[in-house]
Amino acid sequence: MKIKVTVQLKPAILDPQGKAVEQGLQTLGFKARHVRIGRAIEFDMEASTPEEAREQAQKMCEALLVNPIMEKAIIEVLP
Amino acid sequence: MKVAVLIFPGSNCDHDALHVSQRLMGWDATPVWHQDTELPANTDLVIVPGGFSYGDYLRCGAIASLAPIMKAVHRHADEGRWVLGICNGFQILCEAGLLPGALLRNRGLQFLHQRVHLRVERNDLPFTASLGHGQLLEMPIAHGEGNYTCDEETLALLHANRQIVFKYAHPSGEVNDTSAANGSLEQIAGIVNPSGNVLGLMPHPERACEASLGMMDGLGIFQSLEHSSRLVS
């Protein structure tokens, strides 16, 4: 099963990279707002159900992939 | 005093820490590889040096915090022995859970490499015993992710336990919203754990110990440890 974890700074934490990109997009005339930049982590995993895969990915986030002080994760089980 | 200086792939201030420990302080200091599982017997102080461990992949210090040697560092800290994390070492200690909070990207996004002034907020710790309360120390910073942050609960605990040890100050000594170039919460430059034996700071005291380098104020932290070790033994 293929898993994609997107890690972003929490909404309450200023994302200066997102801010800089937002300004760039606005300079180009795009009406982009609230730009947030994150990182995407993809991996294959052996799991019998999508629920099991999601549960394992959640544990990975807690153990290493995410620092809960500043980040949040969105877990997707890809088809 | 017996010192262990940890080395991770990407550490680059390990030699500075060893130089200060051995040549300037006369300590028995040993480099310790990250794959080792034990510290040398009777280590008093572990220095987690600056650098870019594992290329800062994932998050600064995240991979290093899982290295085999870190279990020994946890045991060392639990025994009340001293740990000093400098720059990337501070980030590693936060990721390892030995210190609270996290270091974000600098407010202005730029890597900051400059001299700063620190105000000593506590001088009743082994790391600061020879310094004056409110004393200003000049030393360099060199980091891209030194913007300290934590949640409100943790901040309240930092205050309640008096865990804030150094704050970024203007050369006049004033601490205000503009004195931390990296944007650190409450201008925090260095904190200690509640029991006072694990210190992390972003500035580099080990690069400010010799007149030939133009700054000597970092030496006060190492001299404090020397002073404190004599009181203990």
Image (cartoon, coloured by chain):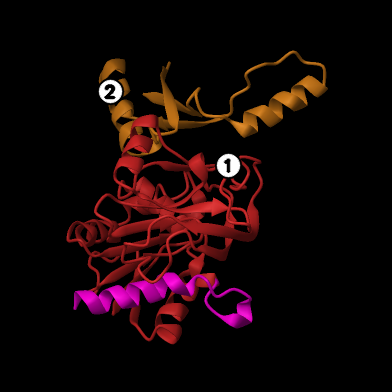
Chain colours: A orange, B red
Local SS, label 1: loop
- Residue under the image location 41 percent in, 25 percent down: A2
Amino acid type, residue under disc 1 in the picture: Gly
Figure quadrant of the N terminus of chain B: bottom left
Local SS, label 2: helix
A1 and B213: which one is in front?
B213
* Picture coordinates of residue B11, whole percent (x, y): 47, 64
Subunit of label 2? A
B36 and B141: which one is in front?
B141
Q: For mark 1, what is the residue?
A: B183
Bounds of the magenta segment: B208-233
Looking at the magenta stretch, what is its main secondary structure?
helix
- Residue under the image location 32 percent in, 62 percent down: B124
* Contact flag, marks 2 and 1 (Cβ < 8 Å): no
User: Is A1 placed left or right of B212 in the picture?
Assistant: left
Residue B87 colored in magenta in the image: no
Labels 2, 1: front one = 1
* Label 2 packing within 10 angstroms: few (<14), some (14-19), many (20+): some
* Picture coordinates of residue B31, whole percent (x, y): 37, 75
